[in-house]
Image: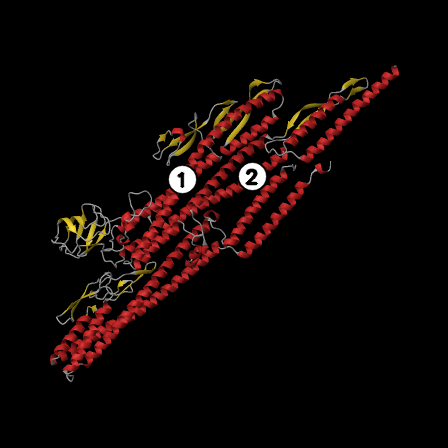
Amino acid sequence: MARTSLQMNQRAIELAGHNLANVSNPAYSRQRLKIQTATGVPTEDGLQGGGVEITGIEHFRDYLLDRQVANEQSVLAYLDQKKKILHYTQSAIGQELDRASSSAEGNAASQGVSGQMGLGDNLTDFFNSLQALSTNPNSQAYRQVVIFKAQNLSEKFNRVDFRLGELVHDLNGEFESMVDEVNNSIIGLEKMAGLISNAEALGNANDVRDRFHKRLEDLCQLVDVQFEFEPVNELNSDNKAVEKLTLSIGGVNVIKKGELVEKLKLSVFDENGQKVERENNVLKRGDTVFVEAINSVEGFQLRSGRIKAAIDARDLTINGFKSSIDHIAQTIKTRINEEYVQGTSLPVIQISDVLTEAWVAGSSGTLSVQELAADLKEGDQILFSNGGTFTVSEDAAMGSSGINGTYQGTTPLTAGLTATIQGMEFFDTTADGLKINERVESNPGLFNASVGGDAGNNDMALRLARITDERQETLSGQTFNESVNQAIAGFGQELFNVETQAVDQKAVARMLEEQRISLGGVSIDEEMSNLLVFQRAFQANAKLISVLDEMLAEAINIVR
Amino acid sequence: MRVTSNSFPTALQYQLESLATKQARLQSQAATGQRFSAPSEDPRATRKVLELQQETRRLSQYNENIDLSSEKLNSVYGAIQAVKKVSDRAGELATMVDDMKSRDQLAAYRQEINQLIEQTVQIANTNNQFGYIFSGTKSNAEAYGITRNENGEISEVEYQGSTDTLGIEIAKGSQISVEMAGSNTTESGTQGLFETREGSFFSNLIELRDRLDSGTREDVAYIRETVTTNLMKDESNVIYHISRVGALEARLETAKTLGTRRITAANEFVSKEVDADLAKTLVKLNEIQTAYLAALKSGSTIMNQSLLDYV
């Protein structure tokens, strides 16, 4: 009796030591020795107590709580990751409110320190510069300002588009390591589940279970996981049914009754939507990566975790915002050009004094002009001050003094006549994104501020400036500014929602975690007090042996 | 509830993280004077503020257009006043012509009128930062070209400008033209300063000078009956333009006042949405700082207590 009691107390002290050793291990759940009164020994006076016996080791884990923690942590990981990516996106969009820089004085004070230069601000500045030009269409300075503002606008739209493209590219690059991590975790979990089944056949698998749940929760950070230990048609040494792990990711079983049956893989699609193989998985810009199950093509649908967050942020938010901005930029380009080509530049061409022959309607050949101030391209229309039009048939470089083409008009061309250029686009339609026509960019005199050719005519500048008030059909009946503001506010609302949901989810996950700590966490004070009890019990039982030994010695001495 | 050794540190970490975040945000509010700066912090207000700020920028541009129009109008007004002086003097001289004047007196008048013609052409071709102010939309070229006779005197004045004038927007959908063409003999648009459907100031001056040159009884009679009347019509036209300048000035002032009021109102809206109430912010910051200190103090006290100290 004393011997079993000593053994029990020694085991209990060892277990308390094990608990104390893991006090700061968050994956550990405390263990406690399960004991019961030993079966009594029959005597003539009745059944006499047999002391104490160990029945097992209790593991303070709650299966239901573990499943809930795994699920909620997966959702929290999804929201946290999405929040992180959307914060990067918000930085890439570059829209901040800065009241200090709102006035002219504040703007000057904020120069180089802070400022507010979002997409909408650049858009307003561009249209304002057109308004300013309309007050003095002759002015080279105002024309230059329009070019500057258009450059700023283009740069801003293109920069935002580029940054978002880079963010998408970086996100695509992260999938490979995440999927590798998932596959490694699945293999690790399969092995651990086997160890659990084997260990439980022999007694308990408490410590392996702790490691299993730690690994499972790590996996939940990446994907949504459902798991269960199911009894199979196999008996252990205690004649109990052996339990084997079934684990699913995204609704698809990856471990079934202890066997690894599925893994995840990546599929790469190029910018045209064609499935491609990339050497060493080095992605190209414009590629899109999808995460799939190798065998289960259908039915695999991630619901939470960091991988799902990256997919949703990329496909729904970033690409959604990016295509909104691209669409607005395209509409700006189309609408401005549509109006602009009907205008005329300043008079930038003058017929040379050495013109020898009169040009009449229908004449074609080389026209002598004073040095060209801008490149001319085939098809450019030159509008002379006598009302006639000259169509360029061959490119002519800046500085040359001859233009090939055909003249149409009612009066002949004479020396000294001036001409404007019309038909040139403002935004280059062949370029991606917004880009100003290089010829206009290098020569503000070519900007079409007028209609009809008068240098002081501001009709085109005004028509362009008024586009800012137009409701664009392709932008759901909104103005450019309204459309940009809606995209920005819509994005802000999405990040706001994710942040709010993350706060709620964090509260849920924290409460569950508190419950788990409360159930399975180690308390130093508790273990110390138990230690004292077990130590004293051990001492008392040792004393019992000593007393019994003395009694035996006395009995032997009586006989002697 | 069972409290374990990890319960306190876990809860304390969460509390400190939450309080530190609040402190950082309140400090940022106090330092910038803004309740928020990123769209995600208040998406609804962000959209409203962006729209109001863009509206303010546009209104400021309209105000700049108004200032520039006022500047232009001043230039135009200066030129009209100069024309008025010429017109007054030409009228006086024309009225002074009669049969009693000697040929020398008429020659002196003629000489003065000739100078007035030169002066008027000079005024008509006034050029400043906005170009030739009486050339209409052809502001890069002189408004009037002249032909001189064998004596070097102006014998003919021809308008080279456009009858169209520049319209400037001073508010959404509201356009103003502060200029006037030197010549507009058409039925539409503002009538020209020097040439209207009623006649040409230059032609009347040249005719006066040339009639004074011959100085016959018929010429004198013609001057008294026809030229004087024509010059009075020119005078009326100049007065019309002076009145128009006055009316335009008033319109510009009204537009600017309205624009400035709208800017002030928009700024007030933006302020209500964005600006932080400094007093409330600082009180809240103080409150959070106190809570942070309390959390540190209580946490460290509790975590320092253990049975280990007593066994």
Extreme residue in the bottom direction:
B100
Under tag 2, what secondary structure?
A: helix
Point out residue B77 in the picture as x, y percentages from the top left corner: 29, 69
Label 2 marks which chain's residue? A
Residue A515 in view, yes or no: yes
Which quadrant does the N terminus of chain A fall into? Answer: top right
**Quarter-wise, where is residue A193 in the image?**
top right
Type of residue at label 1?
A: Glu
Between A41 and B301, the one nearer to me in the picture: B301
Closer to the camera: disc 1 or disc 2? 1
User: Closer to the N terminus: mark 1 or mark 2?
Assistant: 1
Between B293 and A272, the one nearer to me in the picture: B293
Point out residue A501 in the picture as x, y percentages from the top left corner: 51, 41
Could you classify mark 1 by the number of other residues whose Cα lies within 10 Å: few (under 14), some (14-19), or many (20 or more)?
some
Asked if A359 appears above or below A321 in the picture, the reply is: below
Label 1 marks which chain's residue? A
Extreme residue in the top direction:
A560
Point out residue A187 in the picture as x, y percentages from the top left corner: 50, 25
> Looking at the image, do the residues carrying marks 1 and 2 touch, with CB atoms under 8 Å apart?
no
- Read off the residue under disc 2: A508
Residue A476 in view, yes or no: no
Image side of residue B104 versus residue A441, left or right: left
Checking the image for residue B115, the label placed there is: none
- Read off the residue under disc 1: A166
Asked if B60 appears above or below A521 in the picture, the reply is: below
Image side of residue A378 versus residue A214, left or right: left
Q: What is the C-alpha distance between the residues marked 1 and 2?
A: 34 Å
Point out residue B121 in the picture as x, y percentages from the top left corner: 21, 69
Asked if B140 appears above or below A538 in the picture, the reply is: below
Seen at 37% across and 46% down, the residue is A157
Under tag 1, what secondary structure?
A: helix
Seen at 40% across and 37% down, the residue is A169
